[in-house]
Amino acid sequence: MIKRDDIVTVRERARIDEIVSQFVTLRPAGVGSMKGLCPFHDERTPSFHVRPQVGHWHCFGCGEGGDVISFVQKINHMPFAEAVEWLADRSGVQLHYEDDGGGPARPREDPGRRQRLIESHVLAEQFYREQLRGPEAVVARRFLAERGFDQAAADTFGVGYAPKGWDHLARHLRGKGFTEPELAVSGLCTQGNRGVYDRFRGRLVWPIRDITGTTVGFGARRLYEEDQGPKYLNTPETALYRKAQVLYGLDLARKAIATHRQVVVVEGYTDVMAAHLAGVSTAVATCGTAFGEEHIRIVRRLLGDVADESAGVSFSSQLSRGGQVIFTFDGDAAGQKAALKAFDEDQRFAAQTFVAVEPSGMDPCELRMAKGDQALAALIENRVPLFEFAIRSVLASVDLGTAEGRVGALRSAAPVVGRIRDRALRAEYSRELAGWLGMDEGGVRRAVADAERRDDRQQDRQADTRPERPRQEDPVAKLERQALEVALQLPGTAAACGFDDVGAGAFVVPAHRAVHDAVRAAGGTGAAGTDVVGWLEEVRSGAADPVARLITGLAVAPLPVADAAAQRHYAAGVLTSLIRMALTRTIADVKGELQRTDPGSERYNQLFGELIALETQRRSLGEER
């Protein structure tokens, strides 16, 4: 077990905004709050909030939340201890361990399965890179040179060489202390009848890294004719590597993507290398799979891509507010098919989406070799809107020289235009389509409108279970929520304002009362001290799952004030209002019972004394009778 004090230190040192920003583009969302697109569910408007001040995150869409450790656990699919180790490594914290029974600290012999997998990949990358400089790798170096890549380029992208033979890497890793079972599950080796053997043999190898730069797998290109395997061979699915969730080059492109609000999607490892060396620093590629939903989510999070769904209009027509997604495809039929598939997914983007296809069919690597860096940069610069490309591709499949061909083209293209969500763009492309077909604009608009209505009816059938819009919040519930936000985010201020003296009866909403109970179980707000993050975790750990999620939501909700003095004033005002409301409720109850009690009884005198005390307390809060 990791010592508790070290866990507290990791929470303090690992800034949650810096860690989350490695995976999600965060933007200001009010005082002391940041927000972005949730990495744990698909959404078009950002509901994922981070509060650096209290060290917590929460998604108001899916309800997930927690501290920096829980974020790393969920985003990297790690158990608690490995997430702490991951953060400690990046924060410079030396961890100490102790026995489960609380015995003396001892060095940890097993740093965790995931960490062992990562270490094996680090050593494998070093091994492959060293092999690229050896005599056997002359064919690999020639392959790179023929495509315009020197040793410096290979070093930048970590390119290496897997030697021929069955177990060069396996023997190397065994010498570093790795067992055969570890090698078998790493994806670096394959289990055979006589033990494990290298998965990659006689191939040029690229390390595939996650968004943080951690090597999680490899892609390998065939070099020799006698190699009967596929042209490209990737790491199989492992605990580290999931091909649907990685993009090659993303570790190098991440900052440029967020800065320039642009991502260029190419088709291969050498295309990524060529693009980056030509100055297109936002280029990435998929790894042995099509560009799919998980990739879209990754890209949208980095772009900070946001759509105004309430108006039914994306930001795709407002370049200054939206990012750009540029697909490059080969000019052949397969490339056009890939581009049209991207159009089907484009409605998931609020960014402007483009296609860049070289007319003669060259891929980015070939284009750079034939015409230089400027030609590759110009290819990206001369991109075509994906909507236009999709419509023109439909028109190219028919003969527009005949009336029958034009009518058939309209019937095929109208649904494409009708699926464009941006109303202004839809109207503009209807006009463009009329010009390309040489047909009456009114007739084209009617065809597009008919196609749109058919699509809307289908969407309506799918949305029958759509939840109703929540009603406006009750003022009492709102005040209770604000008081709990103050208590969880500013526990020191809340304690000074008397929050811990407030009884459970002050909260009418059952969920709010449960949060109040959790705060009291953690010692009250006065127990937070200087470790607010750790105290919040104690509050959350003492609550059931639905209440724990509510706690994280309250802990990250933006407060309407910034500086410390204003926060104290706001906290005092909210808590005073809560106490006043609770007193008013109690006074009403006492008055009701007083009216039902015999004036000459002892109970009557007791209630009358309580009423006087309550009224006095309420007046002390400044309330007028």
Image: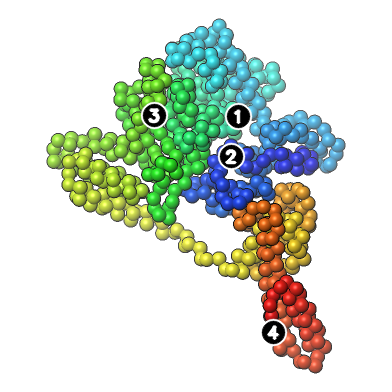
User: Amino acid under label 3?
Assistant: Ile
Residue 535 at what x, y percent from top left?
74, 51
For the residue pair 523 and 193, the one nearer the viewer reads as 523
> Which circle marks residue 21 in the picture?
2
- The CA span between labels 3 and 4 is 77 Å
Q: Residue furthest top?
A: 135
- Label 2 amino acid? Ser
Dot 4 or dot 1: first in sequence order is 1
> Residue 394 falls in which quadrant of the image?
top left
CA–CA distance in space, label 2 to label 4:
56 Å
Mark 2 or 1: the one toward you: 2
Can residue 216 be seen? Answer: no
Asked if the residue at tag 1 contacts the one at tag 3, i.e. Cβ–Cβ closer than 8 Å, the answer is no
Q: Secondary structure at mark 1?
A: loop
Indicate which disc residue 592 carries: 4
Residue at x-position 19% and y-position 50%: 443
**To which residue does mark 1 refer?**
214
State the residue at coordinates (71%, 21%): 177
Label number found at residue 470 = none
Closer to the observer: label 3 or label 4? 3
Q: Can you say which quadrant of the picture contains the N terminus?
A: top right
First-in-chain label (2 vs 3) = 2
Which residue has dot 3 on it? 380
Of the residues shown, which amino acid type is indicated by label 4? Gly
Q: Are marks 4 and 1 in contact (CB under 8 Å)?
A: no
- The residue at 84%/41% (across/down) is 102
Instruction: Check the image and report above or below for 61 versus 345.
Output: below
Q: Is residue 63 left or right of residue 448?
A: right
CA gap between label 4 and label 1 equals: 68 Å
Sequence-earlier tag: 2 or 4: 2
- Amino acid type at circle 1 is Thr
Helix, strand or loop status at disc 2: loop
